[in-house]
Amino acid sequence: MSADPSTPSPDVPGIPPEAPAGRPPAVLQVLPALVTGGVERGTVEIAQALVKAGWRAVVTSSGGAMVREIERAGGTHVTLPLKTKSPFGIRRNIRHLAALIERENIDLVHARSRAPAWSAYFAAKRTGRPFMTTFHNVYGGRGRLKRWYNSIMARGLRVIAISDFVGRAATKTYGVEQDRLRVIPRGVDLSRFDPEMVHPSRLVQLAREWQLKDGLPVVMLPGRVTRWKGHVDLLHAAQRLPHRDFQVVFVGDHEQKPAFRDELIKLVKSLGLQGHVQLVGDCRDMAAAFMLADVVVSASSEPEGFGRIAVEAQAMGRPVVATDHGGSRETVLPGVTGWLVPPGDRGALSKAIGEALALTPEARAQMAAKARALMIHNFDTRLMCAATLAVYTEILFPDHQPESVTAPALEGALG
């Protein structure tokens, strides 16, 4: 099921008439690096939307592969050592950022991560520019020093939270008032994550590359191979399935945590799952990857701020099993588009996976249609971009009254 062409397109706001003539407004997004991940993807998507709307998009980070996407979109990237958490490095970056703000005629500074946010906050203050932030997770901190460090994300003139879950935490833990808080869910690029746009040759190529066995259902867990993502729980859940007619595929970087990767390999052997589990590393074609999956699992033991994997998988019409906390509660409808199971409950996880694998073709098609519809109505990237640019406009041009950008309730998307 692809996007309905009759669905209204949530266009991003253009340059308000109140903007000064002579140059477009310029927004600087600040983050540690542009390697991979949800923060980075959102930064690229907002840069693309800014350029499309006639604004100027400037991004600064320590660099990475996704810099090319910024530049291809018509944005500007400036490399600075923003990954540092050193007080001396942060102080040095204040000077660099202040100079960048003046040189590029930046009108608004948008920080997306804590360490560079400290530099960006004081650089914005030094140059007299408005400063805003995005909470990409709950940023829990048990100690006073940790909470103080995290609190920089609450100092924005406006504070975006990527889910209601994150918004509640920003208010409760860091005192972000409702008049400054804007909840804008992460989005999924529905033109990229569209089942009808994936040519069969891409599936064949990926299946060969991963050496998948013909006819065996695929249970897929995408995400970095790190302990809290739930790889261990999935292996134990798979071992409890009443048959071995499946293959578990872990998609994501496993080079950063070699000790944990080796632990998983040993666990596979001890559970008797040899030949049924593969670690395939990073994948550049996740749309095709999802199409190879019979069920996609997000088994994080800690709450996800949003849960990009569950949203992208549903956009591709795949049934999802996710842990029942964090942002997943806002993106997965139990019994309609997938399953929610208690975190760490391997029995419940196994049961849900078994039910997903046992779906009839008709039931699977119905779930796919509902999942795709839910994503179209609530989590289209264009909704996220339009809402974010509306916040930029609200700060820079307070007298301008753009149309509000809202998504319908989850159930409303399904009629």
Image: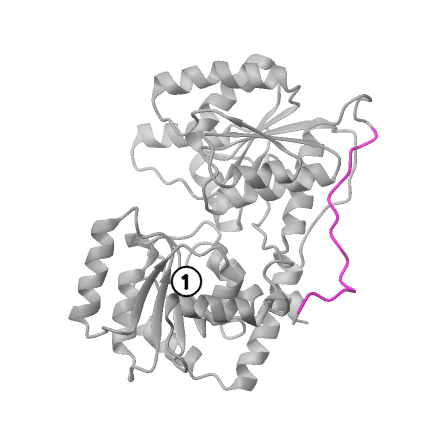
Locate residue 71 relative to residue 386 in the image: left or right: left
Count the marks.
1
Left or right, 235 with respect to 147, comes to: left
Q: Main secondary structure of the magenta part?
A: loop
Give the residue pinned by disc 1.
324
Q: Residue at x 46, y 66 (%)?
A: 206
Callout 1: helix, strand or loop?
Answer: loop
- Using the image, determine if residue 246 lies above or below residue 71: below
Q: Is residue 318 above or below residue 179?
A: below
Identified by mark 1, the residue type is: Asp
Residue 336 picture location, percent across and down: 54, 74
Q: Magenta includes 11?
A: yes
Query: Relative to the observer, which residue lies in front, 87 or 59?
Result: 59
The quarter of the image holding the C terminus is bottom right
How many other residues sit within 10 Å of disc 1, few (<14), some (14-19) or many (≥20)? many
Q: From which residue to which does the magenta span run?
A: 2-17
In the figure, residue 196 lies in which quadrant? bottom right
Could you say where residue 347 lies in the image, as x and y percent from the top left? 29, 73
Figure coloring: one colour
Compare residues 267 and 155 and report the one nearer the observer: 267
Residue 254 in sight here: yes
**Left or right: 371 with respect to 324?**
right
Q: Is residue 20 magenta?
A: no
Tell me which residue sits at (45%, 71%) in the image. Answer: 293
Give above or below for 91 relative to 32: above
Residue drawn at (38%, 19%), measured in percent from left and top?
A: 89
Asked if residue 333 can be seen in this view, the reply is: no
- Residue 305 locus on image (x, y percent): 46, 49
388 and 261: which is toward the camera:
261
Quarter-of-image position of residue 145:
top left
Q: Which residue ends up furthest to the left in the rendered image?
A: 270
Q: Quadrant of the N terminus?
A: bottom right
